[in-house]
C-alpha cells in the first residue's frame, strides 16, 4: 500500500487508532460471534456495558475472556444509567474493574427513545473529567451541547445519528455538519446507523469515526455485515479525504468539446 493510501491515524486523548469503526458487545448470539464481528470489522476498540456484562468467573462465561483487552481497547460505558450520580458511580466502578480511564458516558433521559439527558450528561462529564477520566459522551446531535462538552475537556463527542437501535441512518445531516465545523475534537457518530451506506455517508460528511452495535448484531449475517461496515467506513473516509467534485444543476460533458472532429 502506498503511503498516500495508508489509513490515517486518529487520537482520543492519549489513545491512537487506525480503524475508524468501533463496535459494541451486546445482542450477539454468542461471545464468539461478537469476536468474529470485531475481527472482521477491523475494529480496534470494543465498548462494554458495565451494568450488563459479567465480570465474575464464578457466575459463568465472561465476555472479556473472549473479546480480550489484550487484543482490543475496551471502552466501558454507563448504559442503563438515568442519573448523573448513577453514571459517575458506574464509571468509577469500571475504572477499578478494567484499570482504564476511558469511559463512554451515557445518561439516558427517556426510557422509550433512549435519548440522552443533556443537562445530566454535562454535569456528569464535568465531574468525571475532574476525576481524571477520558470522557466520551453520548449526546444528542445538538451543536451547542457538543461545543460545551468539548470546551470542558472531553477529547471527543459522540452525537447520535438516530435513536439507539433504530437503524434509520443519519436523520439530521445539517446538525452533524455544524457539529463537525464547530468542535475541534473528534466527532464519533453513535447510534442509528443501519447499513453500510449510512456509515459511508457519515464518514463522507467528515465524521472521525463511527460506533455501532445493533446494525451488525441484528443483521441476517452479522459477519458479512461487519465486513460491509468496514468497507463503508473506509470508502466514506477516503471519499472525504479525496474531496468530492462540485455538484451542478446542469450536465457537464465528461470529455472536452474542443478539437472534436467534424464528419
Image (spheres, rainbow, N blue to C red):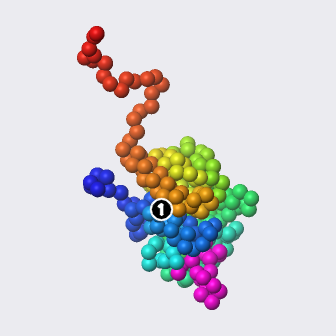
Q: Is residue 191 above or below residue 32?
A: above
Residue 80 location (% of width, % of height): 67, 69
- Identify the residue shown where x is 31% and y is 52%: 5
- Identify the residue shown where x is 41% and y is 46%: 240
Residue 148 figure quarter? bottom right
Residue 61 location (% of width, % of height): 60, 82
- Identify the residue shown where x is 41% and y is 33%: 246
Q: Is residue 75 above or below residue 140?
A: below
Residue closer to the observer: 188 or 151: 188
Residue 111 location (% of width, % of height): 74, 62
Callout 1 crowding tier (Cα within 10 Å): few <14, some 14–19, many ≥20: many
Q: Is residue 152 magenta?
A: no
Taking the view exactly as shown, the residue that stands out farthest to the right is 112
Q: Which residues are magenta?
A: 49-65
The quadrant of the picture occupied by the C terminus is top left
Residue closer to the observer: 19 or 81: 19
Residue highlighted by disc 1: 41
- Circle 1: element type: helix
Residue 158 location (% of width, % of height): 54, 58
Q: Is residue 220 visible?
A: yes
Residue closer to the observer: 161 or 85: 161
Taking the view exactly as shown, the residue that stands out farthest to the bottom is 58
Q: Is residue 185 above or below residue 256?
A: below
Q: Is residue 144 visible?
A: no
Residue closer to the observer: 252 or 98: 252
Q: Is residue 50 magenta?
A: yes
- Identify the residue shown where x is 66% and y is 54%: 166
The quadrant of the picture occupied by the N terminus is bottom left
Amino acid at each position: 500500500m502506498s503511503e498516500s493510501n495508508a489509513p490515517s491515524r486518529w487520537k482520543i486523548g492519549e489513545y491512537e487508532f487506525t480503524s475508524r469503526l468501533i463496535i459494541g458487545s451486546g445482542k450477539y448470539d454468542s461471545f464468539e460471534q461478537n469476536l468474529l464481528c470485531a475481527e472482521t470489522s477491523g475494529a480496534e476498540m470494543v465498548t462494554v456495558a458495565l451494568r450488563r456484562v459479567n465480570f465474575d468467573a464464578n457466575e459463568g462465561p465472561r465476555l472479556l475472556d473472549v473479546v480480550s483487552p489484550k487484543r482490543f481497547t475496551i471502552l466501558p460505558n454507563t448504559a442503563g444509567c438515568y442519573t448523573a450520580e448513577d453514571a459517575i458511580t458506574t464509571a468509577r466502578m469500571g475504572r477499578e474493574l478494567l484499570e482504564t480511564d476511558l469511559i463512554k458516558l451515557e445518561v439516558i433521559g427517556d426510557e422509550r427513545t433512549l435519548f440522552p439527558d443533556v443537562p445530566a450528561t454535562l454535569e456528569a462529564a464535568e465531574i468525571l473529567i475532574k476525576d481524571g477520566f477520558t470522557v466520551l459522551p453520548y449526546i444528542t446531535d445538538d451543536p451547542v451541547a457538543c461545543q460545551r462538552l468539548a470546551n470542558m475537556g472531553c477529547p471527543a463527542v459522540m452525537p447520535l445519528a438516530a435513536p439507539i437501535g433504530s437503524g434509520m441512518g443519519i436523520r439530521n445531516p445539517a446538525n452533524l455538519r455544524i457539529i463537525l465545523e464547530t468542535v475541534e475534537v473528534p466527532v464519533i457518530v453513535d447510534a442509528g446507523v443501519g447499513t453500510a451506506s449510512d456509515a459511508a455517508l457519515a464518514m463522507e460528511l467528515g465524521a472521525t469515526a463511527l460506533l455501532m452495535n445493533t446494525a451488525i448484531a441484528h443483521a441476517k449475517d452479522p459477519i458479512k455485515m461487519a465486513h460491509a461496515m468496514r468497507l463503508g467506513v473506509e470508502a466514506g473516509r477516503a471519499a472525504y479525504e479525496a474531496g468530492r467534485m462540485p455538484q451542478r444543476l446542469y450536465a457537464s460533458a465528461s470529455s472536452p468539446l474542443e478539437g472534436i472532429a467534424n464528419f
